[in-house]
Image (tube, rainbow, N blue to C red):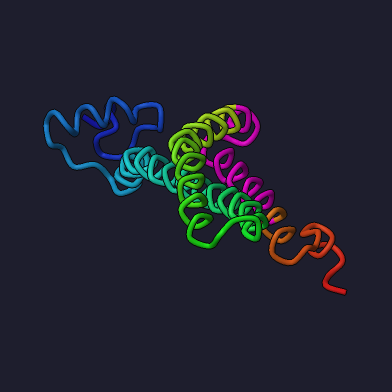
Amino acid sequence: MESLGVWGTAGPQDLTLCTAISHTYRIMLSFPYKRIILATQIFPIMYRYFFRFVVITLTILTVNLITNAITDYMVSYKNHYKPIAFTFLGMAITVVILYPLFIKLESWVKFISVKAIKSGKSVAGKFFGLLFTFLLALLTLAYFYAKVWYHVNFFQVLIHGVK
C-alpha cells in the first residue's frame, strides 16, 4: 500500500490515484494530501462566487452612473414643462430607457468580464486575471464617479494628491 501513496510516502504525481483510492476504500490520507484535496475542491466554488460578486458589483456601479447621467440630463429640461406633466413624462422616459438597459447591462458586463478574464488568464492565471480585471474596472468607474461628483480627474488626484 505504501507505493500507492496512501500512507503519505509517494510523491505528488500519485495524488489523483490516492484520491481515487481514498474515495473508494475510505482510506485515511496524510494531512498534507487532505489539504491539497480540500483546496482543489474549494477553489472552483470560491472562484464562482467571486466572479458573481464582480459581475454584480460592476453592474450596480455602472447602472448607477448611467442612471445619474440620464436623470441629470432630464432634470435640465424641467423648466420647459409643468411640474406634474414633467414628473410623469420623466418617470415614463426613465422606465423606457432604463428597463432595457438594466436587462442588457448585466449580460454586457458578464461578456466583457469573461473576455478580460480569458486574456488575463494567460498572463496571471484564472483568479489573478479576474482580480486584475475587477480592480481595473473599479479604477475606471472611480474615474467617472470622481468626474461626475467632484469634477476632478481621479488619476491626477491619485498621483499628485489634492491641491
Q: Position of residue 115 (x, y in %)?
A: 58, 28
Q: Position of residue 3 (x, y in %)?
A: 28, 27
Q: Residue at x 53, y 55 (%)?
A: 86
Residue reaching furthest left?
Answer: 25
Q: Position of residue 58 (x, y in %)?
A: 53, 47
28 sits left or right of 33 in the view: left
Q: Residue at x 34, y 47 (%)?
A: 35
Is residue 128 inside the magenta stretch? yes
92 up-or-down from 104: above or below? below
119 up-or-down from 57: above or below? above
Quadrant showing the C terminus:
bottom right
Q: How many numbered circles are shown?
A: 0
Give the overall secondary structure of the magenta segment: helix
Query: Is 19 or 45 nearer to us in this picture?
Result: 45
12 sits left or right of 110 in the view: left
Residue reaching furthest front?
Answer: 82
Query: Is 39 or 20 nearer to us in this picture?
Result: 39
Q: Position of residue 151 (x, y in %)?
A: 78, 63
Q: Residue at x 31, y 27 (%)?
A: 16
Q: Residue at x 57, y 42 (%)?
A: 128
76 up-or-down from 162: above or below? above
Magenta part of the protein: which range? 119-142
